[in-house]
Amino acid sequence: MAHPLLALLLLSSLPLHPHLFSSAADSISGDQSLSGNQTLTSNGGNFVLGFFPLGNSPKRYYIGIWYNTNKISILTPVWVANRGEPVLDPSSSVLKLSKDGNFILLNTSKSLIWSTNTNITSNSTIAVLLDSGNLVLRDGSDTSLVLWQSIDHPANTWLPGGKVGLNKLTGENQHLVSWRSAEDPSPGPFYLEIDPKGSSQYFILWNGTERYWFSGPWNEKTKIFSGVPEMTANFVYDFQYVNNASANYFTYTVNTGDIVSRFIMDYSGQIKQLTWVPASQNWILFWSQPRAQCEVYSLCGSFGSCNENKLPFCDCVKGFSKRSPKDWDLGDQSGGCVRNTPLLCGGNSSAGMEKDKFFQMDGVRLPAHPQSVNAAGSSECESACLSNCSCSAYSYSSECSLWFENLINIQEQYAGADQAGTLFLRLAASELPNSSGKKGGVIGAAIGAFLGLLALSAIIWLIIWRRRRRRMISASNAAADGALVAFRYSDLRRVTKNFSEKLGSGGFGSVYKGVLPDSNFIAVKKLLDFSQGEKQFRAEVSTIGTIQHINLIRLRGFSADRNGRCLVYEFMPNSSLDAHLFRGSKMVLDWGTRYQIAVGTARGLDYLHDKCRDCIIHCDIKPENILLDALFIPKVADFGLAKLMGRDLSRVLTTMRGTRGYLAPEWISGVAITAKADVYSYGMMLFEIISGCRNANHLEDNKSGFFPATAVKKLMNGDVLSLLDPRLEGDAEIVEVDRACKVAFWCIQDEEMSRPSMGHVVQMLEGMMEINMPPVPKSLQLYSGRQEGIVFFSDSSIDRSYQTQSTFTSSQVTSSKSTGSKD
Ligand SMILES: *[C@@H]1O[C@H](CO)[C@@H](O)[C@H](O)[C@H]1NC(C)=O
Ligand SMILES: *[C@@H]1O[C@H](CO)[C@@H](O)[C@H](O)[C@H]1NC(C)=O
Ligand SMILES: *[C@@H]1O[C@H](CO)[C@@H](O)[C@H](O)[C@H]1NC(C)=O
Ligand SMILES: *[C@@H]1O[C@H](CO)[C@@H](O)[C@H](O)[C@H]1NC(C)=O
Ligand SMILES: *[C@@H]1O[C@H](CO)[C@@H](O)[C@H](O)[C@H]1NC(C)=O
Ligand SMILES: *[C@@H]1O[C@H](CO)[C@@H](O)[C@H](O)[C@H]1NC(C)=O
Ligand SMILES: *[C@@H]1O[C@H](CO)[C@@H](O)[C@H](O)[C@H]1NC(C)=O
Ligand SMILES: *[C@@H]1O[C@H](CO)[C@@H](O)[C@H](O)[C@H]1NC(C)=O
């Protein structure tokens, strides 16, 4: 197709076409084309178009648009042309204008791989990459005439200026479609679409059939979707809703010039907002929806099960294995799991095989699409399932539900206790442990042979064990003295029973329970990845080791082996604060204890920020990181790790599993993070200590809304007791609740300058400092308006306080008692 002479010229004689291959080229016209590593760069230098590789052996190449790597150092494709059809050799593949005017991609054997595929009447066209990341096909003689543009055909990324919505004239509903996995841009199972019935809300669907997420309707006054309070719309975006006879869509612009931000429909099934933070040279996740990963429909495929308390979230149910482990590793579990042992089913049971059995799974979210059948009781329900070969599970609770073929959407350790049930999973008899089988006799002899060997190794093992025990005991003695102990990795593996009892997991790795030979418990944090050399690691660890305060978790030791790196902490018998506040623990924390936890945490943070040698910013204050000892004295955990892991502060965030509303606004604007970011998170947590509920969760029952927004109004009306966790039944010191509320509001001020230091927080909570009525943070005015349909700051009392006290300074806080704090 291409003129052979021209192709030769294009490939070999750069000087003849300096305008095309110089970095300034932003368009293709006539017979020009793009191959290999040639690219187009938009006029202002923001975006680049060309071939980019994904995967290995073989590398697959795609035509895409990405942020210019001068500015965004990580190659981040925002649009892909040939999503499902990569080319293998870009140097012999060609992107060019075809005879009919379309923009096309041909592979090595000149087959058409991709085309703009539109009806073009003009006889000359030109393709231009705009500085907004939009690739436009224009009429060559009338360049204002747009024939096709990439922004109307988004892939998984919604860029500023793009539209995601419905063209009512053509009936086309433009979706944002996820990639299949981290290395496969072909259309995945999840997509975002606007309500095809014409309302202003977005849905996320799986396989075009199951809607599992709703944005909630758009509120034109407050510019926010009711289900996404995290958007804090007015600060960064200008969203615009268009709904008229021809279209129903949203579009947005980023109103602060320097911020690079995008939405993606991720292959995790979540819609995410990511912002580039130059200081950390990374994309920071600001929020994702649905918040809980397991809310994503069929995330783990058929016979997969999701678990919020485990990483990775997906696994196969008992008796099944991953169909494609390689895809699972890349985040694509859609292939699901396959049965290890076929069911006997209608097979020949007289051949000596046992009938299929059932494996009991308690406390699970039951799979989707049950079929109910009549059955008088549980055993009748069981036989109903056994009698049909394609029945794979049943559940009986007042009625009998059966599932046929695939099981989709199982969630284990399901928190929504009222919806959790018991599932009986049908498995071949040999999969279940208590089925002894009849093969035992044959291998009896072999076992006998092993016994001799075993006895021998037992003796050897005993010798090693005694030696190790001696070593561990001397290590724990050292730890008791307060010295930092260097453990061997292998010893830590043993005392944690091969890292079997998991206490929790965080951004840097999981924490396991262990028992030292002196029967003291320890918590061992197994670090995930580390970029530092051993020497630097030891230096950082010993710095953390010197930080000692009653309200900070104490580091007892570490392992810096090449086998693995661990941090060893004192063990906290009462787990973390979130377990007591949210996870329906039987014992409700009384108000006095809560207040002491609030004060203690503030003291710990104050120490980190101000009192120890180098100021340490924690960056991840949330109830999960406040541990409680036997006396419920709070201990802040996980501090100092960002530096230890050789990471920039803000990169910590990328490893967090979501923001859950503790993040200060300055994280998104990319300015330097100070200790005031911790103050903000502390304030958000303080609200949760008061209410006993996640701030954002209040939203989901659609009654009380975002908690701080409700709280501000109650505080103004002097009705703070109604904010209190209902489980306390009003049993609390009103003065303290009122104080805690006000402190929380001062902490969550939008402006860092307006927030108090942790030292001031301690003084205020201790009653050493009088607290003025805090102004209403701008972000809360939005939330409040959303709830009530009124603009909240029109309330004159708040208006006044907003004007008079825009910053928190010591001068505004009058000391009610002349002396400072007790410390
Ligand atoms: C482009 O590819 C050629 C070989 O195909 C290589 O010599 C050249 O260095 C590459 N240019 C860039 C900028 O990578
Ligand atoms: C080019 O694409 C066609 C159609 O997809 C395919 O059959 C052919 O193998 C491809 N050629 C090369 C060299 O990849
Ligand atoms: C292009 O034109 C042909 C013939 O007029 C028509 O059948 C086809 O639907 C048109 N395609 C598009 C994308 O408009
Ligand atoms: C395009 O068509 C117009 C008339 O239809 C003709 O005058 C012009 O020469 C054509 N241009 C090219 C590049 O073929
Ligand atoms: C996806 O939906 C189609 C129908 O739209 C259905 O045939 C197919 O089985 C579904 N895929 C899965 C994995 O259920
Ligand atoms: C619908 O609104 C868009 C954007 O404001 C506008 O371009 C378009 O002309 C409108 N269509 C009708 C039929 O009003
Ligand atoms: C079951 O197995 C027995 C013996 O192996 C055989 O005689 C009988 O025909 C089989 N029945 C079926 C239904 O396959
Ligand atoms: C098993 O159940 C499925 C679904 O209800 C039904 O379509 C099928 O006919 C049943 N098979 C037998 C053998 O009863």
Image (cartoon, rainbow, N blue to C red):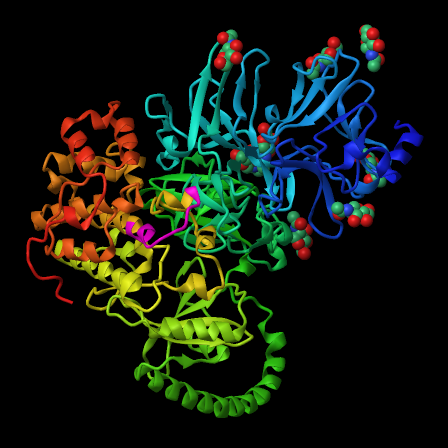
Does the magenta portion include 676?
yes
The image shows residue 815 at horizontal and vertical percentages of 9, 53
* Position of residue 49 in the picture relative to residue 247 (left or right): right
Q: Where 517 falls versus 570 (above or below)?
A: below
Quarter occupied by the N terminus: top right
Q: Residue at x 81, y 23 (%)?
A: 30
The image shows residue 286 at horizontal and vertical percentages of 43, 43
| Residue range corresponding to the magenta coloring | 669-679
Q: Quadrant of residue 66?
A: top right
Q: Residue at x 72, y 25 (%)?
A: 127
Query: How many marks do you count on the picture?
Result: 0
The image shows residue 491 at horizontal and vertical percentages of 46, 80
* Position of residue 551 in the picture relative to residue 662 (left or right): left
Quarter occupied by the C terminus: bottom left
Q: Quadrant of residue 141?
A: top right
Q: Residue at x 83, y 33 (%)?
A: 17
- Asked whether residue 186 is in view, the answer is no
Task: Report the image quarter containing ligand 4.
Answer: top right
Q: Where 620 falls versus 141 (above or below)?
A: below
Q: Where 525 falls versus 463 (above or below)?
A: above
In-front residue for pair 43/438: 43
Q: Quadrant of residue 512?
A: bottom left
- Asked whether residue 406 is in view, the answer is yes
Does the magenta portion include 453?
no
In-front residue for pair 499/620: 620
The image shows residue 572 at horizontal and vertical percentages of 29, 68
* Position of residue 384 in the picture relative to residue 72 (left or right): left
Residue at the far left in the pictured view: 817
